[in-house]
Image: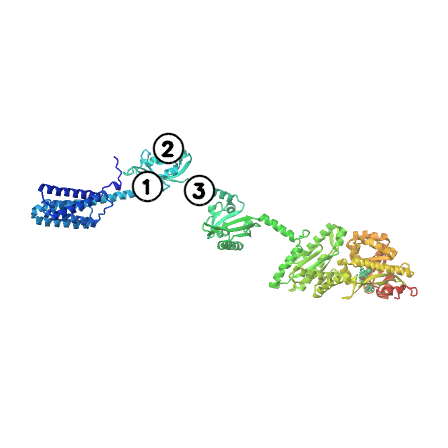
Amino acid sequence: MTIPLLRPASVITTNEVFRVASLFFYIILLVHVAMAAATQRLMFSDNSAAAVSLLLLLFLVSLGRFIWPKAVAYSQGHVLVEMGLVMLLVSMLALQRTVPSVSLSWLIAVAGVFLLPLEAIGALIAILCTVVLSFMLGTWLGTRLSDWLPQLYALVFIGLLARLLSRALKLNLSALEQAHLNERRFDAIARATRHVFMIVDARFQVKYVNPAIHEVTGFTEEEVRHLTLKSANHPDDEEEHKKKLRYLRDVPHSSIFSRHRTRHKKGHWVWVEACGYNMLHDSAIKGLVFSIEDITARKEAERRLAEEHALLRAVLDHNPSMIYAKDTEGRYTISNLSYQRRFGYSSEDALRGKTVQEVFLLQENRSPQPPACELVGQMHRQDLEVMQTGEALIDLETQGLGENEVGSWYRTNKYPLRDAHDRVIGILGIIRDITDRKGYEMRLEHQALHDPLTGLPNRRYVLKEIADAMVEYRTKKTRLAVLFCDLDFFKSVNDTHGHDFGDKCLRELTRRMSAELPSRDFVARFGGNEFVVLANASLLEASIRAEVLLNAVSRQLVIDDVIVKIQASIGIAFLHAGHNSPSELIRDADAAMYQAKEHGRNRVEIFDALLQDLSTKRAQLDVALRFALERNELALAYQPKVSLLDGSVKGFELLLRWNSPEYGLVPPNEFIPIAETSGLIVPIGLWALEQGCKQLSAWNRRYATDGLTLAVNVSMRQLLQSSFLSEVTAILKRTGVPPASIELELTETSAMANPVQTIETLSMLKKLGLRLALDDFGTGYSSLAYLQKLPLDVLKIDKAFIHGLASNNSDAEIVRLILALAQTLQLETVAEGVESAEQIALLNQMGCHLGQGYAYSPSISAQEAERLLQPAAPMTLAS
Ligand code: C2E
Ligand code: CA
Ligand code: CA
């Protein structure tokens, strides 16, 4: 049985009934009046005519109402008025007796028609009025009560029926309207939703489906009606889905949930999520109801998320860096394999939720070590900082703490983690094991700061250490003594025995120094043969250390079966507030060391301000000396060399003099070393040689000066000049001086400093015919082997030994030894600094017959010297 589809428009309303009923009411009433008038041949009175006319008017109104229901208004008031009018007209016609005996019956009709559109109160009033009117008319017309009662009953009953009909129609209409509203709402929802709603019958034939089906499956609603639910599923899901559908159909009131793939019209598979409800029992539905959602996008997102997660996991776990994330409470949320392994965890879950304290301190139930506690505290502070500032912390270096992490180094970066609203929700940590690199760096740093030969700290390290000490000095007033130790004549050890040998000596000396000094002292190799010791020491302590060092260095060294003896000169300086840089402190210690060298080496000097002045003065002299030659400030003096036997003058030693307009007479011992350092000695030395030769040549021409020699001092610096030989040759040629009358004096120390080259140059000079003398013999370090190889003619015994000749036995012994040596090597000897007759006698006794010194003459001017050459004055000097 099909139920006809009802629309509110197709339902009859009270008003429609009223429109029709009222029209018919007027038609019938008018027909009634007309028939009555015709049959009874009544003549209308004026009143009757007016009443009929009015009735006709009302009829027209009701006709209009019938034809144009919307144009003619009939509200409660209108209806009541119209009803009142009708009752008045009926009463008038009844009273006119034109329509006798029907009047009351027409009132029943009035009640039936006009009560239809009225509301409850209006209807009640209307019916009461009708009853009253009917009673009054009855009374008026003399109707008996017993005749009138059935009419009353009919009137009330018809009135009530009209009311009930009106009500029933109204309820009907509103029910239909409600149903229609619901249907439209459902339709709107079913159309708007992207969910598919579907009702199928027990054979799974589609009874209803909403338009969303097209969007999900590509099939139209119509096409779907020809499909069954079972036909469109993916083979993998088929079996299970069928099972679910059977269950749903067979079990009353059951429901199912299913996730499966269904085929799209275009052929691809669509993932859907379906909920099914068995509503076969519901008489309105009589089917299985499905709500189906397309979850392909969600599935795809899930798949992509799973893939991304897997990728992230792989990136994390295959990453050699240790990676973790923590929440704002500092609890681990994410960690990768490397990080888990570092702390002995086997999975991310095992670590999740733990704090760094738990992981570090309670690992293997070890009692928390103070450094570990400190590290944990530090990490916590860093985490907080990152979360509070929202700024990353980069390259934090820490050392490993655990037993299996000894010597390990880690570098950590910490980044803030943010949510979608940019709020910091934790931190991300990435840790790299930089042990290898750190080791390399530390080795590099070590190499940069240490001397590879001795393993001691180098110059850079010393300066850095002093710089640190200066900072500390400013705040804590700590003491710092610098011992600057320079090995004397070490170069000649190298030249004599080779650099390997020298290196071995340095290593052995390093070992000795380190062994003798307290371990807290800082021992460094500052340069080739320079060592620096930094110590927190008083003046006394530093002096003791220096003496200890001198002893350690000067103890004889036996290396590769060769015995050598090395000495050192040590300068000590103390850090004070006036030092602005490490190099200033080193400069002071160096100046003191220099002083020690000047005072005869193998000794210790302590820096004082005077020394500082000295070094300043050296610098000033250096500048002045550069102009001395061109400004004619240099002069030459001559010290006679005399036969100790008879006092006859055998020659002169040429000695430089500098009369500086600024500094007065500057002693050669002061300015010669400066000239040597600056290299000025080269031009000055040549100038002196040329002047001396000129003078000698003049004397040779003027006087019979046969065999007169001129001794000229030559510095090492000059000898090392490759042009020296040619320049000497040129001077000899220019001045015409016989080479044999020139005696070049070089000091023992300078000759020995570079023996190989010295031997070569000296041999060439020798070939030119010049004589060669070794000055200051006995004070320096002489290898006898080399002495033998030097092409010498003369040994000049240093004045230090001559000085103590009469008083000091050991000096006399040395002089004796030197004379014996000279005899063996077939060398002439000259005694320097002869000051007394006693010395002359002793020297003669020992077999030294040449000398110079104040006993005969100090150095004198050329004119004075010339006087000694004049034939009038015998060429002798009284002793
Ligand atoms: P030296 O070559 O040993 O010169 C001898 C020094 O002893 C001279 O000092 C001389 O004045 C001094 N003297 C001479 N007799 C006595 C004496 O009886 N007692 C004492 N106590 N001293 C005596 P001076 O002139 O001051 O020269 C010092 C040094 O300067 C020289 O030592 C020499 O090494 C260097 N020198 C001087 N002139 C030259 C030069 O033209 N070239 C180079 N390269 N060095 C020079
Ligand atoms: Ca000399
Ligand atoms: Ca000398």
Which quadrant would residue 527 be assigned to in this image?
A: bottom right
- Checking the image for residue 187, the label placed there is 1
Instruction: Name the residue: 63% across, 52% down.
Output: 446
Residue situated furthest right in the rendering: 872
Q: Secondary structure at mark 1?
A: helix
First along the sequence among labels 3 and 2 = 2
Badge 1 amino acid: Asp
Q: Is mark 2 within 8 Å of ligand 1?
A: no
Q: Is mark 1 within 8 Å of ligand 1?
A: no
Percent position of residue 654, x then y:
84, 61
- Between the residue at mark 2 and the residue at mark 1, the CA separation in whole angstroms equals 27 Å
Residue located beneath label 3 in the image: 301
- Quadrant (top left/top right/bottom left/bottom right) for the N terminus: top left
- Between the residue at mark 3 and the residue at mark 1, the CA separation in whole angstroms equals 31 Å
Residue 797 visible from this viewpoint? no
- Between the residue at mark 3 and the residue at mark 2, the CA separation in whole angstroms equals 27 Å
Ligand 1: image quarter: bottom right
Please tell me how crowded label 3 is: few (under 14), some (14-19), or many (20+) other residues with Cα within 10 Å: few
